[in-house]
């Protein structure tokens, strides 16, 4: 690929700045994001111009539009720090992350409640079973033991049932 002229480079830089302003205002193309790829597509230049180049001798030089790409990234970071999100998908992602964290907390609370209620149910059922067994034991007919005589009573001898001699 050949080198471009200074006028073409200036025209491309102006197109990149105009596209940068549109993207940072939130005017995103359908299916586009607020990133370097979309910036390059909106400006009509290749993305390679935003990245450093390596020469044949191994030295690294700045890409022709790298300073503009760095400016775009800085301005985008400043907007995000200020709480503005030019890309509605980024705002949606942050909202969904917060919602997901809230739902995970609620789920953990519910799991804890379920564990506590399960333990309570188990305890209540075991107590009810023990009470039922006690009630059934108390209602069952018991064999009455022979009464023991009180300590102060004396036993009376039994009447004789054998006859000795004749009774006339």
Image: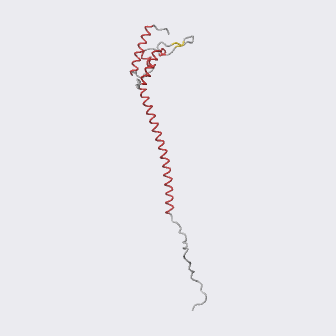
- Residue 144 position (above or below residue 129): below
Residue sitting farthest toward the front: 152
Where is 7 relative to 119, above or below? above
Q: Position of residue 86 (x, y in %)?
A: 40, 23
Res. 145 image quadrant: bottom right
Looking at the figure, which quarter contains the C terminus?
Answer: bottom right
From the viewer's side, name the closer residue of 60 and 96.
60
Q: Which is nearer the eye, 70 or 10?
A: 70
Viewer-side residue, 120 vs 125: 120
Q: How many marks?
A: 0
Residue 50 spot, x, y in % from top left = 48, 16
The answer to whether residue 37 is left or right of residue 145 is: left
Residue 90 position within the rendered picture, expressed as x and y whole percent measured from the top left:
43, 26
**Residue that protrudes farthest toward the bottom in the picture:** 168
Indicate the position of residue 30 as horizontal and vertical percent values.
40, 22
Is 108 placed above or below 56 here? below
Q: How is the image coloured?
A: secondary structure
């Amino acid at each position: 690929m050949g080198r471009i002229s200074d006028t073409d480079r200036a025209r491309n830089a102006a197109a990149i700045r105009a596209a940068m302003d549109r993207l940072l205002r939130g005017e995103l193309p359908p299916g586009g994001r607020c990133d370097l790829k979309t910036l390059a597509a909106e400006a009509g230049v290749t993305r390679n111009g935003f990245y450093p180049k390596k020469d044949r001798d191994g030295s690294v030089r700045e890409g022709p539009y790298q300073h503009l790409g760095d400016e775009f990234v800085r301005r985008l970071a400043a907007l995000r720090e200020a709480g503005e999100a030019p890309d509605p998908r980024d705002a949606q992602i942050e909202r969904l992350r917060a919602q997901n964290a809230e739902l995970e907390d609620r789920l953990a609370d519910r799991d804890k409640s379920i564990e506590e209620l399960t333990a309570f149910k188990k305890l209540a059922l075991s107590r009810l079973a023990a009470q039922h067994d006690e009630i059934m034991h108390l209602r069952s007919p018991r064999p009455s033991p022979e009464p023991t005589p009180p300590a102060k009573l004396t036993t009376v001898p039994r009447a004789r049932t054998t006859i000795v001699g004749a009774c006339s």
